């Protein structure tokens, strides 16, 4: 069977074998072999986010989970060099010892996709480039990758970047790796930029807001000079039969004084400074007379952990969709949702998470059209029994398709690395 | 002038200059095409003035459609194109070729849209970096990356070079502050990449294009993030009896969890040079000096200043001065910002280098630079963006002395090689251009470089866009020139550089 036939033939499979290379050299040897014998391969780390993207059925699978371990960590240089299969949990534990963190807040897709906490691996986080609530302040995963090593589709070991933040030597291929879903390179080593973890955290919660006023508060907060590092709106409305998203149940915290919808703004830093900033934010938003709560460090951590772990969806069997939009268009998007959708807003209104009950392909494509019209894009994060498969999991910019194909070819000329995982033909 | 290897010159094309000019005049207004040697001479160099080459023709398109038509024509006619913004680059990235047209974006000088709701500005690429901040500062916003040439450098050029500035550690470089671009590829295709949303789907072409030094596409529109100005900023001026003490203090400040908005270091030679130049009140007895700037709320800044002072004392600081007001804070910076012209006062000529090293290696690298300085018998002054590890040694020499330029270039290359050896990189913010092209193999092996060249080919199949830049031509690590400044006269002496 030719490689083209193999790529386009859904049930083709030579065997079930998964290879577990232990070293970069072994990864290179495997890929060289597959390149020579025209065998498409599925690449993954621990598999925690394997369900995101189009399903693959390749002749061989290559798991990078055995490329595991911290290579070098220099806290005062603000970087950590890890093998690509290193679990994020191990990295975060190590950083915590030095009061540091991965500031982009790796998302825990485990609850949503595999029913238990699982942050996956460093390589997986880079390949998906999906970042937590701090995104609008500190950037995404792609802003925290300083360099990498990996193996391209011909089995050649390549590297780019370094361990320093200021580096313009050659093209910035690290960015290209982020969000490429393993279609360009099998990552073997990643250099992450790390930052000090905040001493304390506080969260200002405004209760019982409608989406319009919530968006006003989100915009004001994020645009203020109070250095907000999380801004989210969790509405209790609309109530959609069949949807599980339940704000009150998920965020049961002692210091939440009132029921109902929640607008939350996070402030991090030293104690005195965050007290001053909370006060200044309350003044700027002129909300002294509204129902507000302020969460301290402990409860703030629980709150934002639940947010970034998507715990709100943990029991859902419905379709979960992620929509990025310019924040000014959030209301427009929300108004256009039918009564089959529940939603919440993250990133100060620039990101909407949707739970859709009885989603049809037509409904999904209609959401996509609306988002694109508003200048955004849509990703299907989790399928449901009502819509078990969508042709376009990601939103494609048609103008850039042939360029993207050429870039794919420059790394992986025979299209053997995760072919079709992102888009048909890439 | 140092001889520079460039791609093979297409003599046939040069003989067809009149035809090329006529064709370009069909696309843009006749007055926007300059072809007489008197007209093209001002464009023969960018801010790396050691290299000069007049282009075949200079063309000034006025809109994206014209850029697209020019590129499409050049692609079909196999004409090389060198794009240029303000031409303030220090690595020869927009040095023309004898058989190229120089595509100047100077007429793309308008801010298209200020969008406070989405906290971004959409601008044409020829708009200067500083004017973006100026356009939004009345509402308390600013654009964070601030390369020292910000009064003159263009935002399109910033994207092409991924420009930094003194605040990169806390606020990132251009790539971290960019939301979208409109670009034209060599075949004339116009594409929008990104926009007003965070991240985008598909490959991160925005990240690839940022810092690609005009080799992949021509930028015709830029959307950048704007930030609210911090409530307050203060600077501390700290002197140390040795370089090692200063270097250790830098590492300890970072290790303690403080991310200053700016942290600059100077050695004794530069402290004296700059203090003579602007009377900034620097500690002249110190062997090294730090400027540490902290921003945030009033309480936060007070707290941080206190902590920085404590760490400095622990590291044997000989003096500490805290800015009492905005005027004094700016005065502290004035000396640092005058580092380049001040060096021009000390020697007839100087070369500016641009490597980045892990912060902790500073003392080791400065020691090696000192050793090399003795070996080559050339004095050197060091400015260091200590926050992000970006080192700018300024080598002083006299070009009138025989072989002195060659000797200086060799010295410079040795410094950059040493930066790579200690885990750093060849260039932090000036770009590779033609200047460090042949040094690329110090950092990358053949596989790495071939992969990058394949990407170039994927986007510009005939390698017509800005050829001869970034990737080695000689295929060996020959040493080439650095920023050449003769008798204190840089190409643009009024632009501060640091």
Image (tube, rainbow, N blue to C red):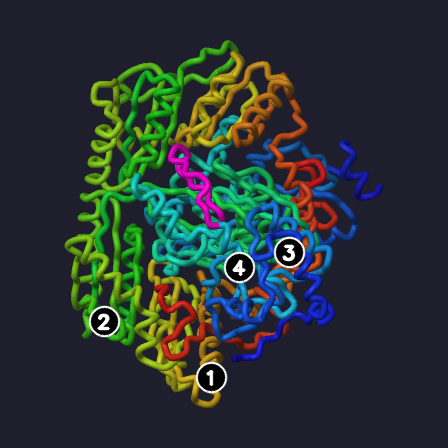
Residue topped by disc 4: B84
Where in the figure is residue A116, as x and y percent of width and height?
A: 49, 28
Mark 2 element type: helix
Residue at 18 percent across and 43 percent down: it is B299
Residue topped by disc 3: B25
Residue B493 visible to an observer of this rendering: yes
Residue topped by disc 1: B407
Residue A157 visible to an observer of this rendering: no
Going by the picture, which residue comes out furthest to the front?
A: B30
Chain label for disc 3: B
Mark 1 element type: helix
| Disc on the earlier residue, 1 or 4 | 4
Mark 3 element type: helix
Asked where in the image residue B142 lies, by quadrant, the reply is top left
Crowdedness of circle 2 by 10 Å Cα count: few (<14), some, many (20+)? many
Residue numbers of the magenta segment: B109-124
Quarter containing the C terminus of chain A: top right
Chain label for disc 2: B
| Disc on the earlier residue, 2 or 1 | 2
Residue topped by disc 2: B275
Q: Give the answer, above or below, for where B121 lies relative to B244.
A: above
Where in the figure is residue B188, as x and y percent of width and height?
A: 66, 49
Chain label for disc 1: B
Do discs 1 and 4 belong to a common subunit? yes
Relative placement, left or right, of A418 versus A378 is: right
- Label 1, label 3: how many angstroms apart (C-alpha)? 45 Å
């Amino acid at each position: 069977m030719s490689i083209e036939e193999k790529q386009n033939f859904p049930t083709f499979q030579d065997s079930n074998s998964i290879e577990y290379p232990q070293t970069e050299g072994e990864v290179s040897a495997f890929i060289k072999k597959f390149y020579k014998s025209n065998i498409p391969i599925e690449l993954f780390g621990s598999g925690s986010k394997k369900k995101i993207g189009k399903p693959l059925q390749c002749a061989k699978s290559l798991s990078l989970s055995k490329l595991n371990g911290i290579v070098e960590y220099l806290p005062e240089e603000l970087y950590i060099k890890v093998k690509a299969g290193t679990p994020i949990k191990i990295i975060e534990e190590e950083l915590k010892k030095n009061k540091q963190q991965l500031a982009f807040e790796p998302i825990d897709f485990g609850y949503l996709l595999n029913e238990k906490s699982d942050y996956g691996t460093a390589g997986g986080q880079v390949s998906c480039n999906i970042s937590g609530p701090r995104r609008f302040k500190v950037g995404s995963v792609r802003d925290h990758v300083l360099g990498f090593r990996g193996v391209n589709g011909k089995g050649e070991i390549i590297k780019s970047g370094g361990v320093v933040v200021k580096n313009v030597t050659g093209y910035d291929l690290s960015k290209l790796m982020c969000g490429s879903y393993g279609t360009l390179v099998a990552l073997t080593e990643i250099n992450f930029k790390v930052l000090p973890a905040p001493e304390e955290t506080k969260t200002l919660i405004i209760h019982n807001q409608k989406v319009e006023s919530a968006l006003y508060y989100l915009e004001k907060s994020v645009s203020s000079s109070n250095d907000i590092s999380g801004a989210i709106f969790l509405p209790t409305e609309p109530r959609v039969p069949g949807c599980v998203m339940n704000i009150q149940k998920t965020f049961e915290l002692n210091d939440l004084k009132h029921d109902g919808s929640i607008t939350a703004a996070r402030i991090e830093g030293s104690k005195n400074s965050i007290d001053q900033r909370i006060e200044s934010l309350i003044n700027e938003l002129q909300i002294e007379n509204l129902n507000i709560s302020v969460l301290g460090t402990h409860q703030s951590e629980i709150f934002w952990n639940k947010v970034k772990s998507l715990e709100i969806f943990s029991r859902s069997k419905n379709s979960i969709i992620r929509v990025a939009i310019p924040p000014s268009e959030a209301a427009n998007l929300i108004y256009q949702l039918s009564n089959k959708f529940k939603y919440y807003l993250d990133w100060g209104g620039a990101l909407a998470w949707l739970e859709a009950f009885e989603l049809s392909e037509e409904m999904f494509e209609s959401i996509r059209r609306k988002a694109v019209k508003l200048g955004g894009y849509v990703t299907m994060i989790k399928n449901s029994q009502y819509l078990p498969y969508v042709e376009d999991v990601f939103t494609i910019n048609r103008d850039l398709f042939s360029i993207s194909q050429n870039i794919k070819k420059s790394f992986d000329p025979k299209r053997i690395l995760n072919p079709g995982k992102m888009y048909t033909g890439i | 002038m140092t001889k520079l290897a460039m791609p093979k010159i297409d003599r046939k094309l040069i003989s067809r200059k009149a035809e090329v000019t006529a064709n370009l005049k069909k696309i843009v207004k006749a007055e926007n095409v300059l072809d007489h040697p008197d007209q093209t001479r001002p464009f023969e160099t960018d801010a790396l003035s050691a290299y000069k080459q007049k282009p075949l023709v200079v063309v000034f398109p006025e809109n994206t459609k014209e850029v697209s038509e020019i590129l499409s024509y050049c692609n079909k006619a196999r004409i090389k194109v060198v794009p240029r913004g303000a031409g303030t680059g220090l690595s020869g990235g927009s040095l023309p070729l004898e058989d190229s047209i120089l595509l100047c974006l100077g007429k793309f000088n308008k801010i298209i849209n200020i969008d406070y709701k989405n906290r971004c500005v959409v601008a044409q690429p020829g708009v200067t970096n500083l004017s973006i901040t100026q356009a939004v500062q009345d509402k308390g916003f600013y654009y964070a990356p601030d390369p020292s040439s910000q009064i003159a450098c263009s935002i399109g050029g910033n994207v092409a070079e991924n420009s930094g500035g003194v605040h990169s550690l806390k606020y990132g470089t251009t790539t971290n502050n960019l939301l979208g671009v409109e670009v034209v590829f060599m075949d004339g295709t116009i594409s929008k990449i990104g926009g007003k949303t965070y991240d985008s789907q598909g490959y991160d072409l925005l990240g690839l294009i940022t810092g690609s030094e005009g080799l992949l596409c021509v930028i015709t529109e830029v959307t950048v993030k704007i930030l609210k100005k911090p409530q307050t900023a203060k600077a501390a001026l700290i002197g140390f009896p040795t370089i090692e003490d200063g270097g250790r203090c830098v590492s300890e400040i970072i290790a303690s969890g403080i991310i200053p908005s700016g942290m600059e270091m100077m050695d004794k030679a530069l402290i004296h040079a700059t203090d003579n130049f602007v009377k900034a009140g620097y500690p002249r007895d110190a062997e090294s000096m730090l400027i540490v700037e902290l921003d945030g709320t009033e309480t936060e800044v007070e707290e941080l200043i206190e902590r920085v002072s404590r760490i400095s004392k622990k590291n044997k600081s000989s003096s500490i001065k805290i800015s009492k007001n905005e005027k004094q804070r700016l005065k502290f910076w004035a000396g640092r910002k005058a580092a380049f012209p001040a060096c021009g006062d000390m020697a007839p000529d100087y070369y500016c280098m641009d490597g980045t090293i892990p912060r902790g290696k500073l003392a080791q690298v400065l020691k090696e630079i000192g050793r090399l300085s003795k070996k080559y018998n050339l004095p050197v002054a060091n400015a260091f963006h200590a926050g992000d590890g970006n080192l700018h040694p300024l080598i002083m020499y006299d070009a009138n002395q025989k072989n002195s330029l060659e000797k200086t270039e060799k010295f410079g290359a040795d410094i950059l090689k040493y930066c790579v050896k200690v885990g750093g990189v060849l260039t932090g913010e000036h770009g590779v251009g033609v200047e460090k092209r042949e040094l690329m193999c110090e950092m990358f092996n053949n596989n790495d470089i071939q992969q990058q060249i394949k990407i170039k080919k994927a986007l510009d199949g005939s390698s017509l866009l800005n050829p001869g830049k970034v990737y080695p031509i000689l295929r060996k690590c020959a040493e080439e020139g650095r920023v050449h400044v003769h008798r204190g006269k840089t190409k643009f002496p009024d632009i501060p550089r640091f």
